Amino acid sequence: MSNTACILSIDQGTTGTTALLVDVKGNIIIQGYQEFTQYYPHPGWVEHDPEEIWNATLQAIDAIFKKENALNIVAIGIANQRETTLVWDRETGKPIYPAIVWQCRRTAEKCAYLEKQGVAEEIKEKTGLVIDAYFSGTKIAWILDHVSGARERAERGELAFGTVDTWLLWKLTDGAIHKTDYTNASRTLLFNINTLSWDETLLEILNVPKAILPEVCPSASNFGTASFYRNFWLETFGKNISLDGIPITGIAGDQQAALFGQLCVKPGMAKNTYGTGCFLMLNTGAEKISTKTGLLTTLACSLDENPIYALEGSVFVAGAAIQWLRDGLRIIKSASETEEIASSLPDSGEVFVVPAFTGLGAPYWDPDARGAILGLTRGSTRDQIIRATLESVAYQSADVVKAMSTDAEMALEHLRVDGGAAANDFLMQFQADILGINVERPAQIESTGLGATYLAGITIGLWNDIEELEVNRADHAKVDGSTSTARVFSPQIDARQRSEKLAQWTKAVQRVMS
């Protein structure tokens, strides 16, 4: 192990941090994970402790060192939960307020006010985004307006803003580097994705001083060098090891990192991450496509200063619907049993579950819609409801894929998938059936962490090009054994059956819309 060059990948998520050690073949050698606390100080508010995020990251890395002390780590890559907002003192490195998480809705009223000011179209044209509390811009302004003296200090350049990637980069470099990448900057409502720069007009609209913002770089860049004291790990974890001197050469927001980790690097290639919700992203290359269906236009990972654009759409409730079966209805004991139950039935008996627990997103955009179980008869069963709930994840994803194809004026040839629910064979097969295209599941579904790894490795020349990574991906798919989940799911129903099912789903959705 000591002579094998490896990349350390940090995948900092909403509920925990995963650290991966990846070799030159793209194999995950060692993995560590550490959860941290979620704070809900008021209804609709979500916060993290920035120092807890940092400590969880250190503990995830330490879990790797516990398994192997002699590591030849040649670069570090970072992927992160997007939009989560942190502000800290440049001199002391101490946060002035808890991190405001992407899920937090505290600035919804501010967003509604901005909508009334008639700036939505300008913001959309420059950022590809809608005005929403989801994004970082209004969160920054909220912190500056609610922490005594913060706005004045920010204007004097005494404070620093960052999304989680920037915070980790600052900590890893002992406060020497204040940077982010295109993908994370593009989620702030402040970054012009046409000019690839912070936009003075947007800064004025959202009342954010430019002095607080980080430098923005392509996702594959030399962001800086880890600068730990040589005895840091000895003092902290009792080990005579260090990250000192290792370059940090890849950074991307989690969904863009997953797109790159799936090697969806050509226009028309798309991925879907199946988690609590679903995040679909379509690479549109150098072409910035203005959406007509309510999707987001954003920046994907780039290896140089030439922008790569993407369309993004979200399914609000995916894995959360399975959790509802377990924790709400209590008709299953674990998510894993749904695959066998669903596969045991020929169909759902025309039962449809529309899990609009928090409204409907693209392409319907009805925040007032509420969930429903439709098509119930006296003969309907628990198992049919379970199968219909799984099917709803595929139907909702198909709605977003259709919107993407409409906006981009291109038909998807295949869909690459990752995330926890991608391990469900029934769901993946039904997704292929409903889309009418192949669904490709890789051998390693840690696509987010691998995306950061690939960016870091390409930057330092560990891999020469994307083609080399594609060869590694193909080799993984040939691996025999229980740890390999690589599989291509091909459609098993004809066009008529597909059309009928989709028509029934559309009818069910229309029944729940307000």
Image (cartoon, grey):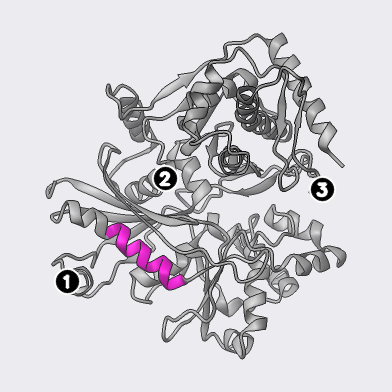
Looking at the rendering, the stretch of residues picked out in magenta corresponds to 50-61
Q: Distance between the residues labelled 3 and 2?
A: 36 Å
Q: What element carries label 3?
A: loop
Please, what is the three-letter code of the amino acid marked with disc 1? Leu
What kind of secondary structure does the magenta stretch mostly adopt?
Answer: helix
Residue 28 in the image: state x and y as whole percent: 29, 41
Q: Dots 3 and 2: beta carbons under 8 Å?
A: no
Nearer the observer, 179 or 259: 259
Q: Which numbered disc flags the more N-terminal residue, 2 or 1? A: 1
* Disc with the residue nearer the chain's start (1 vs 3): 1
- Name the quarter where the C terminus is drawn: top right
Toward which corner of the image does residue 137 lie, by quadrant?
bottom right
The residue that appears at 69% across and 38% down in the rendered structure is: 355
Q: Classify mark 3: residues with Cα within 10 Å, few (<14), some (14-19) or many (20+).
A: few
Which of label 1 and label 3 is nearer to you? 3
> Which residue in the structure is indicated by mark 3?
368
Q: What element carries label 2?
A: helix
Q: In this view, does 235 lie to the left or right of 253?
A: left
